[in-house]
Amino acid sequence: MAGRADARRGADGTRERCPAGSGNGAVVRVLDGSGRSERLNPWPLASAMPPLAAITTAPACARAYLVTVLASWHMNQRAAELQLIVSELAANAVAASADKSGSPWYIEGRMPVIRVCLLSDWALLRVEVWDQAPGIPLLRSPGDLDESGRGLALVDHLSTRWGWHPAAGQPGKCVWAEVPLPGAASEPLRA
């Protein structure tokens, strides 16, 4: 699971983490507090799951992958919360990749895929879920009788911060969430 991370230049000239890459020293695009300037942040630990078909079994596969990576990184302390986060993000990516009846839509004759990337600097764990679907994630306030719409509220509650950005040079987006790790320094260990 470890190796050299891939990065590519986006249409706006910034670099972002490639969803297909994995390895040590991964690079992600991060907006500063103003939401305008960008900087590169290296992550010492990174792992990317092979592409998953955007079907209803993908969230369970993403959870199993997360548990395996957390065990190999000796970061099991918040596994239950992180499983909820990756499951919600993957379920949202699957839903965004389906038509109104819930059937996957196809891109040029191919089923859409999602990708799960895990990044850490020992103080934070970042979960990224990439999809090929249009649209943006929205935090909603569902009614008591609504059957859906609570996923991002759960992610918002369990994570320190979350967000999204469009995928550069291809359709889709990356939705991510960051969770502090117990016993970690108050400031992330980033170069």
Image: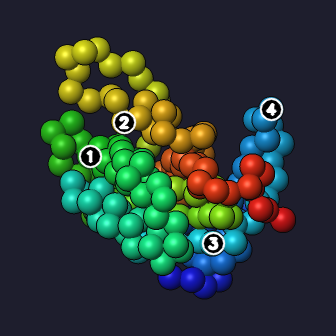
Q: Could you classify mark 1 by the number of other residues whose Cα lies within 10 Å: few (under 14), some (14-19), or many (20 or more)?
A: some
Whether the residues at callouts 2 and 4 have beta carbons within 8 Å, the answer is no
Percent position of residue 108, x then y: 33, 62
| Residue 74, placed above or below residue 124 | below
Percent position of residue 66, x then y: 41, 65
- Mark closer to the chain start, 2 or 3: 3
Percent position of residue 76, x then y: 46, 64
Which residue shows up at 59% across the image and 55% down it? 181
Residue 151 numbered tag: 2
Question: What residue occupies the far bottom of the structure in this picture?
Answer: 3
Direction from residue 119 to residue 94 in the image, left or right = left
Which residue shows up at 44% across the image and 43% down it? 134
- Mark closer to the chain start, 1 or 4: 4
> Does dot 4 land on a helix, a strand or a loop?
loop
Q: Nearer the viewer, residue 23 or 95?
A: 23
- Mark closer to the chain start, 1 or 2: 1
- Mark closer to the chain start, 4 or 3: 4
Residue type for callout 3:
Leu
- The residue wearing badge 1 is 98
Label 1, label 4: how far apart the Cα atoms are? 34 Å
| Residue 89, placed above or below residue 42 | above
Q: Nearer the viewer, residue 147 or 108?
A: 147
- Mark closer to the chain start, 2 or 4: 4
